Amino acid sequence: MSMIVSSIGQGLLWGILGIALFLTFRILNFPDMTVEGSFPLGAASAVTLITHGVDPLLASLAAFVVGALAGGITGLLYTKGKIPILLAGILVMTACLSINLRIMGSANVSLLGKKTIFSPLAGLPKYFDAIFIGLTIIVVVTLVIIYFLQSELGQAFIVTGDNPTMAQSIGIRTDRMTNMGLMVSNGLIAFGGAVIAQNNGYADINMGIGIIVIALASIIIGEVVFGELTMNQRLLAITLGSIIYRFVLLIVLQLGFSTNDLNLISAILLAICLMAPRLNSLLHLDKVIKKGVTVHD
């Protein structure tokens, strides 16, 4: 039972990353590699500030700011420097490795004995603090994004991703929209890194490896499992996809696989989900399932 509760809590916490990446990956159609640098950047910034006596909540908000700066730099390299999308993100991601070492002063920093945003909830049953914090953040972030996407600015942001040429023709400054999206997305990614680092009790220089796969898994699993949805429903599906992903990892570990295999398994799972529409068209799986249900009835 405790493992199930833990998986739900982790799914909610990591769901923040899925929602953040949705803004660039799905809405802007921007394959942003910056996230693998901004995630540990947020963790390093928050943990270092906490160890120096800064309030955990303020440290987490500071992580959002530094993450937004990283996203902004990627945006400027792409929109003003005319550097290809993927390369711009890789450049910033690489730079973040050195910056993170500068911030922490070592490869990892522990929060042992330090107060975190989870400390006030120490009286709750094990892992319920992660569920409470994760659910609170997910609800707030989701509602803010829903409100934003329904605003005039949000609609301009969506149009920029759908058709940049048309967006420019009606007076939308697409470069600004792209920069804004990258800043908000990476700010949320860094904030997620700060929260997860506090939940883990440490920040590590290598904790950003494979982050983009984990965040994409939340998005893709949500889309594959729940099918055609409205924009608001897709945001909810991302969180549910993140929880489903954590349950899949739990099952894999229960089958005896090593934790060292998780990145490989995550990549394979994501590849299968991405190929699901193609496999369905080739094998007509929907018809087979429907036929099976009819026969059973």
Image: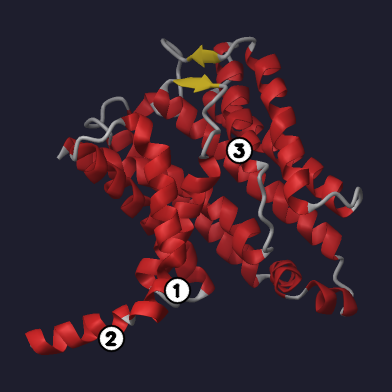
Q: Check contact, mark 1 vs mark 2: CB within 8 A.
A: no
The picture places residue 270, in percent across and down from the top left corner, at 44, 54
* Label 2 sits on residue: 287
Q: Is residue 9 left or right of residue 231?
A: left
**Above or below, comparing residue 188 to residue 208 in the picture:** below
* Label 1 sits on residue: 278
Q: Give the Cα distance between marks 1 and 2.
A: 14 Å
Looking at the picture, which amino acid does disc 3 mark?
Glu
Q: Give the Cα distance between marks 2 and 3.
A: 39 Å
**Quarter holding the C terminus?**
bottom left
Mark 3 or mark 2, which is nearer the start of the sequence?
3
Q: Nearer the viewer, mark 2 or mark 3?
A: 2
Mark 1: secondary structure: helix
Residue at x 60% of width, y 65% of height: 147
Mark 2: secondary structure: helix
Mark 2 or mark 1, which is nearer the start of the sequence?
1
* Label 3 sits on residue: 36
